[in-house]
């Protein structure tokens, strides 16, 4: 009986050492590529490359807390600050030309984000002026031609910052072809904007 009690104590002690995965998809700002690989294993990595500042862009097939609609995830790491951006790509959504199935999936994900982050800072659902794909049945072709926008985003404001040290969250609809769409969910952590500015300065220094 005592041996069993000791076993329970040991298991509970080990569990208490596991870090809480509180951020989006169980990922948190500042995590290193090594920490993510330690959690998930190397076999989940689709590809990776370094950027001009020595940071890393890595695509993985899963995350600590995956979503059933997502197919893979892009993670962007700064060498100094760790994880600064997450981009989740949904599985392909087979749809009619009016995009009904894409819209339904968009609304589902948008509403889930509303539950977590509140009302969007802004939302767009429009066709570019002068587009040939301006009819309801042209929805998917409009997305494919980059002439239709369906997107919502949330951003940190001084009076109401986003949780998890995020500066921006967004969901948008895209298309692969006239019968297939997909969604992209983006999370940008604090410091991302500064990192992008540094990247641009580094790249433009060649001129």
Image (spheres, grey):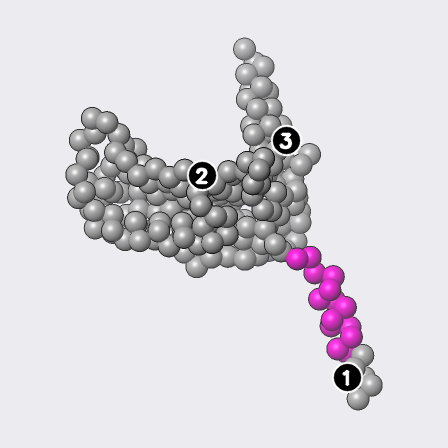
Which residue carries the number 3 mark? 54
Labels 2 & 1 near each other (Cβ < 8 A): no
Q: Nearer the viewer, residue 76 or 153?
A: 153
Is 197 above or below relative to 90?
Answer: above
Circle 2 — which element?
A: loop
- Looking at the rendering, the stretch of residues picked out in magenta corresponds to 7-20
Which residue is situated farthest in the right direction here?
2
Which quadrant does the C terminus fall into? Answer: top right
Which residue is situated farthest in the top direction here?
207
Q: CA distance from mark 2 to mark 3?
A: 33 Å
* Tag of residue 121: 2
Q: Residue 84: image x %, image y %?
A: 59, 39
Q: Main secondary structure of the magenta part?
A: helix
- Whether residue 52 is visible, yes or no, is no
Q: CA distance from mark 2 to mark 1?
A: 54 Å
Circle 3 — which element?
A: loop
Labels 3 & 1 near each other (Cβ < 8 A): no
Identify the mark nearer the N-term, 2 or 1: 1
Which residue carries the number 1 mark? 4
Circle 1 — which element?
A: helix
Q: Residue at x 74, y 61 (%)?
A: 17
Does the stretch in magenta take in 73? no
Identify the mark nearer the N-term, 2 or 3: 3
Q: Residue at x 32, y 36 (%)?
A: 149
């Amino acid at each position: 009986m005592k041996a069993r009690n000791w076993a329970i104590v040991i298991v509970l002690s080990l569990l208490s050492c596991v870090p809480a995965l509180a951020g989006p998809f169980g990922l948190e700002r500042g995590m290193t590529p090594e920490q993510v690989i330690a959690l998930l294993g190397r076999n989940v990595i689709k590809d990776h490359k370094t950027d001009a500042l020595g940071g890393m862009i890595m695509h993985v097939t899963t995350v600590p807390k995956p979503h059933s609609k997502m197919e893979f995830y892009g993670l962007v790491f700064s060498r100094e600050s760790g994880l600064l951006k997450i981009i989740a790509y949904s599985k392909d959504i087979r749809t009619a030309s009016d995009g009904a199935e894409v819209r339904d999936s968009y609304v589902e994900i948008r509403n889930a984000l509303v539950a977590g982050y509140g009302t969007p800072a802004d939302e767009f659902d429009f066709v570019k002026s002068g587009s040939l794909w301006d009819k309801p049945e042209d929805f998917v072709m409009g997305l494919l031609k980059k002439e239709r926008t369906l997107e919502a985003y949330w951003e940190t404001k001084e009076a109401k910052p986003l949780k998890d040290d995020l500066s921006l969250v967004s969901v948008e609809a895209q298309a692969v072809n006239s019968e297939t769409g997909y969604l992209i969910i983006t999370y940008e952590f604090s410091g991302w904007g500064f990192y992008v500015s540094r990247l641009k300065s580094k790249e433009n220094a060649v001129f």
